[in-house]
């Protein structure tokens, strides 16, 4: 075919360009595509000496086990619910902060506030772990305060309830500055004319926000929510692991797929089961992105991912 | 609102609306300043707690726990950290080395890839773009990746295990590509006329024109490397190869004890700092970020908005 010959001739002419992108292609082959072959482990009873194809093939046994024991259901429920909370609360807080940052007039105040809100984004999750330790351990600040006002100290590591809020709090806290900047940029892109016209009509600042800012932020909001929904099966391993660690008491309420897979690998050495859970996560996540992208394409083609 | 007021407003629309607006604006400002001050404090308080904890006397912590405002001031924890500072210095050296090597190599490869993919005359650019993009949609998961890294590539306990995984990301390449697409094509065309090769065009023309993009990618990469503890947790087994954040993690989880001259404390019959030491190490490990981020933040904001607008 002449078309094919054309491409090869063209590639020959752009040898340098091919050479320049070769390391990148090699990188993704080695670190992303070759591991995809490894999902075969999910269908085996892993044997450390056997390697990939020396392990015994067991078909869907690992998946059946995960389903029957209810592990998969619990992990999925936790992963999805936590992510929904992160996404919704995170975006709402970011919008509120962006709206105020855009409208207030004190320049120095706004600069300082924005800088401080961005601080958590730059800190490592290990440091977040240090905060949690400082706040909630036996010697933590919360217990010190409880004792000072004459209440009994509270052993956080025996109860699951508070951790749900702690996890959501730190997730929102860490992403606040980042998201606020994106919403702030969207607000800044709104033409001043709308506000000028509204002011002449005597609209109050609250009316301006309700009838101009928020409706015009809606596309950004929906887009960001949709994109986040595509990643809803990916937990935040750092967040959960640094806050909860290897505290078995709390797993019921705080175990997500990522932490389960990590433990399969490092604690239980259950390679087949862990790979199976990971593969389930990849497939579910892939399907979600496809659905989300389909929805975006239907509504606004410009914003679709592909 | 009463009819009278409405009529008044109609009669003197401009003046009336201004008075009303002022009242509403005052309420808005009060809510805004209060809320943002509160949010800012929430973002700052955890860090204050760590610093305060690190300067508290160990005995106060043992008897009363960590405090919002400690009653004592003590430098023991820092004295202890720096009594035998080799471990901390070593971790600093590892982190700085890995961050520098990884970020520079990452910027180089990402910008080259972004440039090639931005060239409209590169025949298979769409195919390669999808090849790279697909890795964000589907992955083999943690375990096959881990087995590849350790069994097949033999990277267990190697610095390469810290440098390679974060080196290239599809997002960075896409960001770079859209940045370079905004450079006028005529520049490349005229350079070609003058007989410049593709690499020379990239090196002499494209790179200098993309410094803001390079800075953004570089900052993302550097921050990722500096704060990385996960890869060390997965692959590094020798104490002397611990990067900073992983050392901090180990000390916090009491899995590793900072080598200090605790013998001196035992002899002197004084409580050695342990709780306060954890906090002091946290401060020492985070210090540079806190000092640098106000300057870096501006670039981040710029880069973010560029990425957000251009998709």
Image (cartoon, coloured by chain):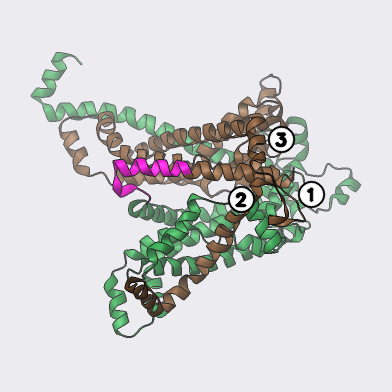
Chain colours: A brown, B green
Answer with mark 2 or mark 3, whichever residue precedes in sequence.
2
At x 43% / y 78%, what residue is drawn?
A: A16
Q: Quadrant of the N terminus of chain B?
A: top left
Residue A247 badge: 3
Does residue A294 show up magenta in the picture? yes
Do pointers 1 and 3 mark residues of a single chain? Answer: no
> Can you say whether B11 is above or below A106 in the image?
above
Label 2 near label 1: C-beta < 8 Å? no
Q: Are marks 2 and 3 in contact (CB under 8 Å)?
A: no
User: Which chain is disc 1 placed on?
Assistant: B
* Residue B52 shows in the view: no
Which stretch did the figure color magenta? A287-306
Q: Main secondary structure of the magenta part?
A: helix
Q: Residue at x 57, y 34 (%)?
A: A76
Dot 1 crowding, Cα within 10 Å, few <14, some 14–19, many 20+: some
Residue identified by numbered label 1 = B257
Closer to viewer: mark 1 or mark 3: 3
The chain to which mark 2 is attached is A
Circle 3 residues within 10 Å: few <14, some 14–19, many ≥20: few
Q: Residues within 10 Å of mark 2 (few under 14, many from 20)?
A: many
Q: Which mark is residue A39?
A: 2
């Amino acid at each position: 075919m002449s078309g094919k010959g054309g491409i090869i001739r063209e590639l020959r002419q752009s040898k340098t360009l091919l050479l320049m992108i070769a390391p990148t292609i090699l990188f993704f082959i080695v670190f992303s595509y070759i591991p995809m072959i490894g999902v075969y482990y999910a269908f085996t009873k892993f044997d450390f000496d056997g390697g990939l194809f020396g392990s015994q093939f067991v078909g869907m046994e690992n998946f059946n086990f995960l389903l029957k024991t209810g592990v998969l259901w619990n992990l999925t429920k936790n992963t999805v619910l936590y992510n929904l909370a992160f996404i919704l609360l995170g975006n709402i807080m970011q919008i509120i902060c962006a709206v105020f940052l855009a409208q207030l007039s004190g320049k120095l105040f706004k600069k300082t506030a924005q800088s401080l809100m961005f601080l958590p984004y730059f800190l490592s999750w290990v440091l977040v772990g240090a905060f949690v330790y400082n706040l909630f351990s036996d010697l933590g600040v919360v217990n010190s305060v409880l004792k000072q006002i004459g209440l009994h100290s509270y052993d956080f590591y025996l109860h699951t309830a508070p951790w749900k809020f702690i996890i959501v709090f730190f997730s929102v806290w860490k992403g606040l500055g980042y998201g606020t900047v994106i919403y702030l940029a969207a607000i800044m892109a709104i033409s001043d004319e709308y506000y000028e016209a509204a002011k002449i009509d005597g609209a109050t600042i609250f009316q301006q926000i309700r009838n101009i800012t928020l409706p015009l932020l809606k596309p950004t909001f929906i887009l960001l929510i949709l994109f986040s929904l595509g990643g809803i099966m990916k937990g935040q391993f750092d967040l959960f692991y640094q806050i909860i660690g290897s505290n078995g008491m709390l797993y019921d309420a705080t175990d997500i797929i990522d932490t389960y897979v990590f433990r399969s690998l490092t604690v239980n050495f259950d390679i087949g089961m862990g790979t199976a859970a990971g593969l389930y996560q990849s497939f579910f996540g892939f399907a979600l992105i496809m659905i989300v992208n389909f929805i975006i394409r239907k509504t606004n083609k410009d914003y679709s991912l592909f | 609102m009463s009819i009278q007021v409405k009529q008044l407003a109609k009669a003197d629309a401009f003046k009336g609306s201004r008075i009303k607006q002022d009242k509403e604006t005052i309420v808005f400002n009060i809510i805004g300043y209060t809320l943002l001050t509160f949010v800012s404090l929430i973002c700052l308080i955890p860090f204050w707690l760590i610093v305060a904890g690190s300067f508290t006397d160990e005995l106060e912590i043992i008897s009363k726990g960590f405090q919002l405002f400690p009653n004592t001031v003590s430098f023991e924890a820092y004295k202890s950290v720096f009594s035998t500072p080799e471990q901390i210095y070593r971790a600093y050296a590892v982190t700085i080395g890995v961050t520098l090597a990884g970020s520079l190599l990452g910027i180089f490869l990402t910008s080259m890839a972004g440039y090639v993919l931005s060239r409209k005359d590169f025949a298979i650019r769409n195919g390669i773009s999808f090849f790279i993009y697909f890795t964000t949609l589907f992955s083999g998961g943690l375990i096959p990746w881990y087995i590849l890294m350790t069994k097949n590539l033999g990277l267990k306990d190697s610095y390469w295990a810290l440098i390679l995984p974060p080196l290239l990301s599809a997002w960075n390449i896409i960001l770079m590509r859209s940045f370079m697409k905004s450079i006028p094509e005529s520049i490349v065309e005229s350079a070609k006329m003058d007989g410049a090769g593709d690499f020379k065009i990239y090196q002499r023309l494209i790179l200098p024109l993309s410094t803001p993009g390079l800075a953004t990618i570089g900052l993302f990469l550097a921050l990722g490397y500096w704060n990385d503890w996960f890869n060390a947790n997965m692959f590094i087994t020798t104490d002397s190869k611990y990067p900073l954040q992983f050392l901090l993690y180990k000390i916090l989880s009491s899995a590793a004890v900072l080598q200090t001259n605790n013998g001196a404390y035992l002899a002197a019959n004084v409580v050695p700092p342990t709780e306060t030491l954890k906090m002091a190490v946290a401060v020492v490990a985070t210090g540079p970020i806190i000092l640098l981020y106000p300057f870096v933040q501006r670039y981040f904001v710029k880069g973010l908005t560029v990425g957000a607008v251009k998709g």
